[in-house]
Amino acid sequence: MQLKSGARPIRSCVFLIVGLFLAVTPLLADSRFVSSNTFLPETTPARDIYYLALFALTITGCLFVVVGSLIFYAAFKYRARKGDPENEPAQVYGSAQVELAWTIIPVIIIVVLFLTTARIIYAIQNAPVPSSALKVTVIGHQFWWEFRYPELGIVTANEMHVPLSTSEQPDPTFLRLLSADVDHSFWVPELGGKTDLIPNHPNEMWMDPQKAGVYYGQCAQFCGLEHSKMLIRVYVDTPAQWAAWVHDQKQPAVDDPKVAAGRQIFETQACVSCHAVKGTSAKGTYGPDLTHLMSRATIAAGAADNTPANLFAWIKDPQTFKPGANMPAMQLSDQQIEDVVAYLTTLH
Amino acid sequence: MADQTFPVPGPLETERTGGNAAFLEWMHSWIVTVDHKKLGILYIAYALLFMVVGGAEILVVRIQLALPWSGIVSPGVYNQLFTMHGTTMVFLMGMPILFGMGNYLVPLMIGARDMAFPRLNALSFWLTAFGGFMLYFSYIGGFGLYGMGNAPDVGWFAYAPLTSLKISPGHNTDYWALSLIVAGFGTLGTAINIVATVISMRCKGMTLTRMPLFVWLMFITSALTLVTITPLTAAQIMLEIDRYLGGHFFDAAAGGAPLLWIHLFWIFGHPEVYVLVLPAFGVANEVIPVFSRKAIFGYSAMVMASVGIGFVSLSVWAHHMFTVGMSAFSNSFFVLSTEVVGIFTGIKIFNWIATMWGGRIQFRVPMLFCTAFLFQMLIAGLTGIMLSVAPWDWQLHNSYFLIAHFHYVLLGAIVTCVFAAFYYWYPKAIGRMMSERLGKWHFWLFLLGFHMTFDIMHIVGLDGMPRSIYTYPADRGWLWMNVIITIGAFIQAIAVLIFVWNLIWSARHGEIAGNDPWDAWTLEWASPSPPPAYNFAIEPVVRSRRPLWDIKHPNDPDWKYEP
């Protein structure tokens, strides 16, 4: 009987905390906004983290309620009042038993939390790589992302496509994370935790997204002037979308004679020393691959929508969208820029 | 009363009159002083200056972040502002203000006439001060003589290879490294001095187990400082070798290891947090008992927990590095070591509550701050436990949740205790009480602003907002939270201005304090306010942890009960 009444406040405490928490989550997932909420997991690792987080939150929440109430109770109950006796209160110097109690209880809590945590660490980090898994090499640059699919021969930037993974047909993606210059960190909260991209220190992470759609994230390690505009989009494609995307990306660049003027400018200016267009003389690797530029929704690592007007402004002066970007203004005339934009907009 | 028991010398310096000459003499006396009290005040004044400067920097940052895609400052200026804010608050505000308090109080509390090495003490202060001013000179000299001034913009953690000469040309990164090396030598000098003072200058009867807990914590902090500043200085020298002498420590292109910098920085950086927080705990250890009118509960447990924190803090650095790609075993090890610190901190919080339990708590301003400290330290500790859960840290790391957590520690715990210390010891140092009315305005406004800012920061971090970004997309729904955070920051700024005004106003108009305004129990309250040069005319003799309690309660002295 006594046990039961003792357990009730603890249980209602847990309910209260988890309930409060679940009440706040939809607030953050407002439909007017795109979300990058750490509590809306869509992959196995992200979901493991989410449940572990709820567990840790429940423990710390209970500790908060108990110890916080003790602080308030002590401060309120033992405050000095008018009419207190003149002499000092009884002096208590300590108690070994009490000290022992409030050492051992936290030790037990920590042991439980540690073992749970270690289990999840091993489950996520040491997950076996199935031979069928898609492998993507992610390379961080100041200030954009390069995605290479070595098995498919695809190179793209800033917007990564991965296949949907279902329980009937698991299709996980394993990322190999490299850096071309400084430290970066790959973070798309709904697809999992972040992992750093450190020069000379290749890292790995994996995801098996179970809901098709677009996921948003960004660089999470300060990497210089334009760290803020180093956004990531991950498209999780249904099998049909995925097959179509792979097919399109494998095509050589469109060669449209109507935009020969623009192509000529592009290939005779310094553009080609940084950018590549497959099947042409443009073979630079310092900037994003432009072979299928128009298949992407944004330019400049998500700093602006991919529209002809934005492309024009971007080429005229990259610093407008992204002060600090490494692409220089090429000092072309407006007519020349228009030609180049016309050429670029054919690169589907 | 008390001063009759512990005789103190009269003023040594004879007052001289006469306009300009007197002023110059006064200036001269402060510049050449080797008196631990004057140096302590210099440290604190210097730190307060940088508190205002570092605070102003972050207000600009907060204005910039209030709205998405805003362009109040350019990314370059923004990066300089947050780099300077972090560096200033840790190295030019946090450490000097705490070491300044240690400098002022440790000799008084252990009944010594000065620090062990008074001249080293002066050298240390001026090195620290020179380092700070050198850092700020970078605004003028960052690009040498051939361009615009430029402050460091690589973050206060300055991860390599962002700091390489190729990626960060100009001299601003050099100013960051060199000025901190200089300030670091100053800090090391003070740390050596405090360790030596505590070991060798204690008055008769002041055994290690009778030392006030503030002295214990300054002692542990100083010992920890000796271990932690060194790797930072070494890393910064390696960085300069890379930049100018053709070294390849962090140069990835030549096979160097940028990861090494992260290790070296956090081997310094994590114990550094405890270097800052332990003196703050020390303040709480003095203030909470006096205002609860009870002896500290579990003195020896407090000492053991503090020593425990000191040792374990040396083995937790890689919990800043769960995302750099360590093995599952290493990750698990640092989860465990980090959570062990939580146990020790828990013991301390329980002991403080037990000290309040059964007391008659007088909620004067210092105690208000210490109660807020207890509550905020509890939250900071619990969010620390959350961050120690490595897989969850993969989500939380470098998000605003992390920023909220460490500002809860630095501001909610450390600075809150520093404010308590000001209200508590100002009467001793200046001889006048600080205004209680202004103090309460300061307290409540600061509390309100603090919670508006940092409580909301946890949520925006959970919603995926990373740190160090100068702007963010409008479609993420972070707007309303950032507006509240910014308003809270300004409320805190107003509170700090009230505090600074209180410091100035009370120096002239405050109530005369007398020797012992709080009816306290440690030795510093036995000397006049302000204490004269050389503190005590004859060496005091103590028989317990609370010598003034013994004098005030001759029938019921502590030494009857203490083991």
Image: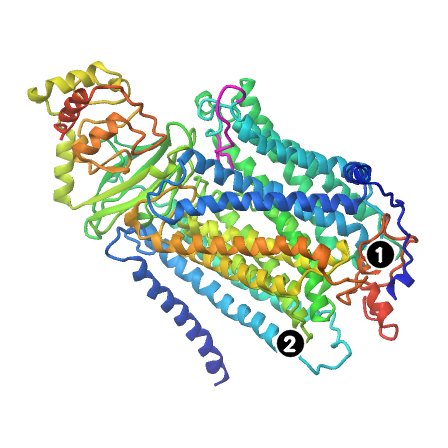
On what subunit does the disc labeled 2 rest? A
Q: Amino acid at mark 2?
A: Tyr
Query: Is B166 contained in the magenta span?
Result: no
Q: Is residue B157 magenta?
A: yes
Which secondary structure is most common in the magenta stretch? loop
What scheme was used to colour the molecule? rainbow
Q: Secondary structure at mark 1?
A: loop
Q: Secondary structure at mark 2?
A: loop
> Can you name the residue that lies furthest to the front here?
B19
The structure residue drawn at horizontal position 59% and vertical position 75%, both measured from the top left corner, is A76
Residue drawn at (75%, 40%), measured in percent from left and top?
A: B192
**On the rendered structure, is B237 left or right of B329?**
right
| Residue B239 position within the rendered picture, expressed as x and y whole percent measured from the top left | 55, 27
Q: Amino acid at mark 1?
A: Met
The answer as to whether the residues below labels 1 and 2 share one chain is no
Circle 2 Cα neighbour tier, 10 Å, few/some/many (<14 / 14–19 / ≥20): some
Residue B191 visible in rendering = yes
Position of B108 with respect to A313 (left or right) is right
x%, y% of residue B364? 66, 67
The residue that mark 2 highlights is: A78
Q: Is residue A234 above or below residue B422?
A: above
Q: Residue furthest top?
A: A268
Q: Chain of mark 1?
A: B
Extent of the magenta region: B144-160
Please name the residue shown 87% across and 45% down the image: B15
Say if residue B340 shows up in the picture.
no
- Residue receiving disc 1: B206
Q: Is residue B285 left or right of residue B108?
A: left
Instruction: Give the residue drawn at x 52%, y 60%.
Output: B379
CA–CA distance in space, label 1 to label 2: 32 Å
**Image position, residue B292 (x, y; %):** 69, 70
